[in-house]
Amino acid sequence: MSESYRLLLDATIQHLEGLKSRGVRHVAVAPATLRALSQAPPAAPKAPATSLRPQFQPAPPLELRGSRREEAQTIPPAAARPFQPSSSNPLPAAVPESLPVLPPLRPEAKAAAFGALRERALACVKCPHLAAARKNVVFGVGNMDAQLMFVGEAPGADEDEQGEPFVGKAGQLLTKIIQATGLQRSDVYIANILKCRPDTPGQAAGNRKPTPEEMQTCIPFLHEQIDLIRPQVIVALGATAVEGLLGKTVGITKLRGNWQTYRGTPLMPTYHPAYLLRNQAMSEKRRVWEDMLAAMEKLALPISEKQRNFFLKA
């Protein structure tokens, strides 16, 4: 077995064990991935004839392995589990908030798992209407070891064109907000609920909100990103991001500024930067900044008196 294959296999097993410890019993696996897993891994260079190393045996089908002597549960194909939304609760219920602390991934294994996740996302065509309309899959950008992660709604036209989240006018404002905290864009991680731009047939411009079905289909990629990054704080930008992560449809005006919990991680809901572009009142800018101050305090970042007084009337 090659070293890169072993690292990727170790990271996959650890990631699946972490998911199982959090109550997850099934994950979606594309048919092409199942076919690839049924094949023998790339062969490592043959050892000399005098080597006593045993021959590698092909691995059994991918399983979620528990720590007890219980029967392992084979992951069923995604096609066997069609999405059936409920009108009262279209998104899945939140996972229990109290979760075990997972051991850190080795940097090599983490990079390999992140790369494999990215490749799966870039090849995804589970939403044919989005795949047909997109120019690029917008996976995410930033530091894989970030303490602070921002989650938005979905790519817009600029993001679809460049393949990177938050690069339009709203993204430029988000970058300024990040810099105001003393961090750089490269210090954090930025992603969206949807990896593809919601299609807008017949429109040259404009955006629409992702549907519950689209969010349900795409959000496992985001869950895996968060599980690999393991940020200390998540900032959810706008009501759709909160709905996708927490399943809550309460207005963002009521939620913003109040700490929530996403699978054991503190989550701060705040307004989307696009809202501040539409409403540039000093009071609204101050509300978003107060949410960022709370995130900074949670991360134990230094806060100057000047920063505390941003957007306050003289």
Image (cartoon, rainbow, N blue to C red):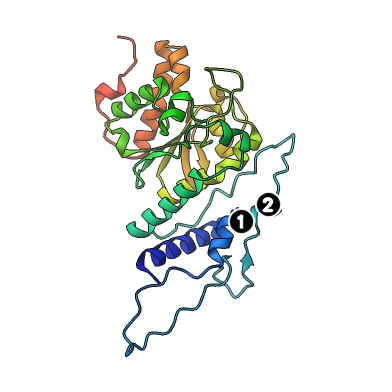
Q: Position of residue 248 (x, y in %)?
A: 61, 34
**Residue placed at 69% from the left, 37% from the top?**
90
Residue at 40% x, 67% y is: 6
Image: 285 above or below 304: above
Left or right: where 22 falls relative to 73: left
Q: Residue 121: image x %, image y %? A: 50, 45
Percent coordinates x, y for residue 195 in the rendering: 51, 37
For the question of whether residue 27 can be seen, the reply is no
Image point 46% across, 36% down: which residue?
Answer: 138
**Front residue (pair 40, 158):** 40
Query: Which corner quadrant of the image does residue 208 belong to?
Result: top right
Pair 2/1: label in front: 1
Considering the image in quadrants, where does the N terminus appear? Answer: bottom left
The disc at residue 79 is: 2
Question: For mark 1, what is the residue?
Answer: 31
SS of the residue under disc 2: helix
Q: Decide: is 28 above or below 292.
A: below
In this picture, residue 116 sits left or right of residue 308 = right
How many numbered marks, from 0 up? 2
Tell me the kind of residue under disc 1.
Pro
Q: Position of residue 192 (x, y in %)?
A: 49, 35
Regarding mark 1 in the picture, which secondary structure is present there?
helix
Q: Are marks 2 and 1 in contact (CB under 8 Å)?
A: yes
